[in-house]
Image (spheres, rainbow, N blue to C red):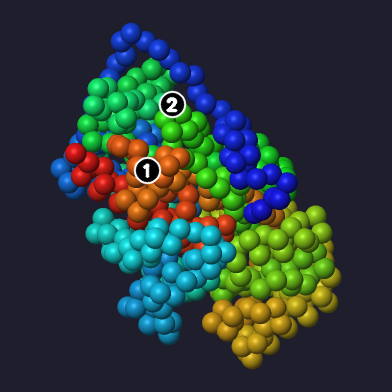
Amino acid sequence: MRINTLNRRKFNHLAFGLICSLPFTHAAELESFEADIIVIGSGAAGLAAALTAADYGKSVIILEKMPVIGGNSLLSTGLINAPDPERQKLVGIEDSNELFFKQTYDAGHRSGNQELIKVMVENALPTVQWLEKYGIHFKEEVIQIYGGLWPRGHNPKVSHGRGYINFLSKACKDRGIPIKTNTQATAFLRGSGKRKNRITGVRAFVNNVPVEFKANCGVIIATGGFTANQKLCAQLDPRLQGMNYTGSPSATGDIFPAVKEIGGQLKDLKEIQCNLGPVGHFSHRSGYHTDVKRHILVNKNGRRFVAEDGLRDKLRDAVLSQPDGDVFIIVDSDGFQDLSSKFQQSGATSEALGYGWKANSIKELAQKMNISPGNLEQTVDEYNRAVASKKDPFGREPWMLVKTINCPPFYASKARMAIHYTMGGIVIDTQARVLDGNNLPIEGLYAAGEATTGIHGTNRVGGNGILDAFVFGRIAGQSAANQK
């Protein structure tokens, strides 16, 4: 998202000022813990970093500010992109790392860091295989997730991010890696003498008691973005004023002031992505739009208005241009049955709350939605003809014109745009080292996942977020373990 009235420096200064830093406590003696590596955050990036560091024989402590682990990763759809000839041939899809790179770079409006993108792409399939070694299994058929641009989304059999967090946290427990919850990191420790410029640990509050965690090799930031900081998001982009968010309330960006204090570089904080969210609370989000080939979007007039397989920023703008910003996601019985059990349950909850509907005909569905039955019937007929001809007047790609909407019962859910992902944050290099204002590595400090910036440019491809977290989490773990 671009706002022309403020330049980048002013945006980042404003963002830094709006993120509330926690109190800094000076004490003569604090309780302290020590490990080779301290990881801040227990989502996908943090768990991947911890397990990778342990592979190198390093001791690790994970800090998590919330009483439960997982962060945004726990609530994600869990779909992870990777070119995968074995799975993709099952649906007649050709793919390559070169195509994946091009689509990621182009989708970010060619503003992403090409070296970082290349690293993510090249490590995509190996990361899926790494997850499988930890007992995380994926469905055979890859799909194109909303905003994903190509059918390369690997769908975990344990839906959403639950499988990732369950299996990887169990692996941490089995390997003796403690995860300290209710532990809020607030500042970084520096060394002394010849090590004065090196990060040597973290100052934190454990259940509001100040504690120090000393790191012999390095500290890894894996705290996620700031989607739950609605005040900051709206200040950066006024269109987001009053918007709900789709993730965890833990995603507030409160580590950023500490990063800034030790000279770390923050960049592109204004680049904030939206996704279709609920009218009510996030837990009631239908998710009918997750698999692009299964749904259509219509407005209050019962008309389609966009190609549903487009870029997320294009979809955002199209939805926001509709009356009141309200749209409806339509699927049939086949589409509903293909949803995860969690999304099916959320759809039922939406129906009970009055913004989800189920009917045995399109006409009856439209009547329940209080929109024109004739318009909706015509829209669905036109879409089904587009599937048959492989030609869509809105420009939907032929490979996403494969499923008609004709199997009753039919389902609809009302949706609005919601704050979903922050693409700006901490600047890193290909080794996941945090860079200072001169683009030089800060010794002993690493970062991965949504807390960082550079990969997604100004628009993230759906299915790349969890991939980014795992890939660079593993790289951060390796880099920190190799720190001398």
Three-letter amino acid code at the position of disc 1? Leu
Nearest the viewer among 119 and 429 is 429
Callout 1 secondary element: loop
Three-letter amino acid code at the position of disc 2? Thr
Instruction: Pick the quarter of the image with the C terminus.
Output: top left
Task: Give residue 394's quadrant in the image.
Answer: bottom right
Q: Is residue 261 left or right of residue 202?
A: right
Q: Is residue 338 visible in the rendered structure shown here?
A: no
Instruction: Pick the quarter of the image with the N terminus.
Output: bottom right
Q: Residue furthest front?
A: 438
Q: Residue furthest top?
A: 28
Q: Which residue does the image show at 54% across and 82% down from the upper left?
A: 399
Dot 2 and dot 1 residues touching (CB under 8 Å): no
Q: Which mark is residue 186?
A: 2
Which x, y percent locates residue 16?
57, 34
The image shows residue 122, relative to residue 391, as above or below, that is above
Q: How many marks?
A: 2
List the residue tagged with mark 1.
Answer: 440
Which x, y percent locates residue 326?
75, 57
The image shows residue 83, relative to residue 438, as above or below, that is below
Q: Residues within 10 Å of mark 1 (few under 14, many from 20)?
A: some
Q: Is residue 377 visible in the rendered structure shown here?
A: yes
Which x, y percent locates residue 62?
32, 35
Q: Which residue does the image show at 61% across and 88% down from the upper left?
A: 390
The image shows residue 179, relative to residue 207, as above or below, that is below
Q: Which residue does the image show at 83% across and 77% down from the upper left?
A: 374
Q: Is residue 328 left or right of residue 200?
A: right
Q: Which mark is residue 399?
A: none
Q: Is residue 344 left or right of residue 436?
A: right
